[in-house]
Amino acid sequence: PRPKVPLKKYSSQESASSDPDEPDMNATERTKWLAVRQMRVVLFRVFSYLDTKTLLMVACVSKEWRRVSRHPALWRHVILANSYISSEFLITLSKWCTQTWSLSLKGLRGRGIMAEESPESYELSVRGSLEAGLEKFLSTCHDTMTELHISDCENILTDKCLWLISGYCRLLTTLTYLSSMDPITPQVMWALGGGCPGITSLFVHPQQPCRKSSAMNNRCLLLIGQLYQDILELGLGGKEFDKT
């Protein structure tokens, strides 16, 4: 369930409903302005209970609904799951996600394969296709992002996204990265440790069947022990671990 967003957040100085008060408004204009403002406050309160998909839908109802739905305080928890999205979509979404705390990307897919494409050329063309949009999103909310979940996104998000996370998300405390195509490697683990030193919950076990089952090995485990000595939750897996 989405947490309640305090009403005072919407009536603050930065609020989308805080239109400048015109000193020369007559009584009729002021009454109309107050009615519009009250409507926006009510809409904001209702929208604070909506999930990401529904927020995107209500923005299509009218200009007023779109204006209210794009207030940054409504986008603190963003969940995009089981659908096709593009980098352009993430770049647009980032414009009103300046206060995002948590981002979850699950089961996302690339564009469909075209008739004249071979499976090999299709896989190559969509590989990492969402990473430009993710980079823009992370750069927008780098001061607030503390929780990030990426799972089952085929190859539109590769292990490069972990390098991006290490560069933008210094405040991150929770990270989930589950992939069957590009599991975490020791090099990426080292970058994460330097860029995100505050992680206390880390889930990076490869999804099965995994194309690169040897990527996660003893070296990854040793680095996690060295870099995250205060870790509280840990999810690992791999065929290359041994008793040493």
Image (tube, helix red, strand yellow):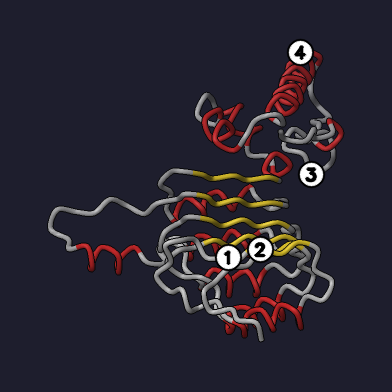
State the CA–CA distance, disc 1 to disc 2.
6 Å
Q: Nearer the viewer, mark 3 or mark 4?
A: 3
Contact? badges 1 and 2 (CB < 8 Å): yes
Rendered position, 108 above or below 128:
above
State the CA–CA distance, disc 2 to disc 3.
40 Å
Quadrant in which residue 136 is drawn: bottom right
Reading the image, the residue beneath label 4 is 28
Reading the image, the residue beneath label 3 is 14
Seen at 71% across and 64% down, the residue is 234
State the CA–CA distance, disc 4 to disc 1.
63 Å
Reading the image, the residue beneath label 2 is 235
Q: Please tell me how crowded label 4 is: few (under 14), some (14-19), or many (20+) other residues with Cα within 10 Å.
A: few
Contact? badges 2 and 4 (CB < 8 Å): no
Reading the image, the residue beneath label 1 is 205
Q: What residue type is labelled 1?
A: His
User: Under tag 4, what secondary structure?
Assistant: helix
Q: What residue type is labelled 4?
A: Thr
Tell which of 91 and 230 is nearer to you: 230
Tell which of 66 and 144 is nearer to you: 144
Quadrant in which residue 32 is drawn: top right
User: Under tag 1, what secondary structure?
Assistant: loop
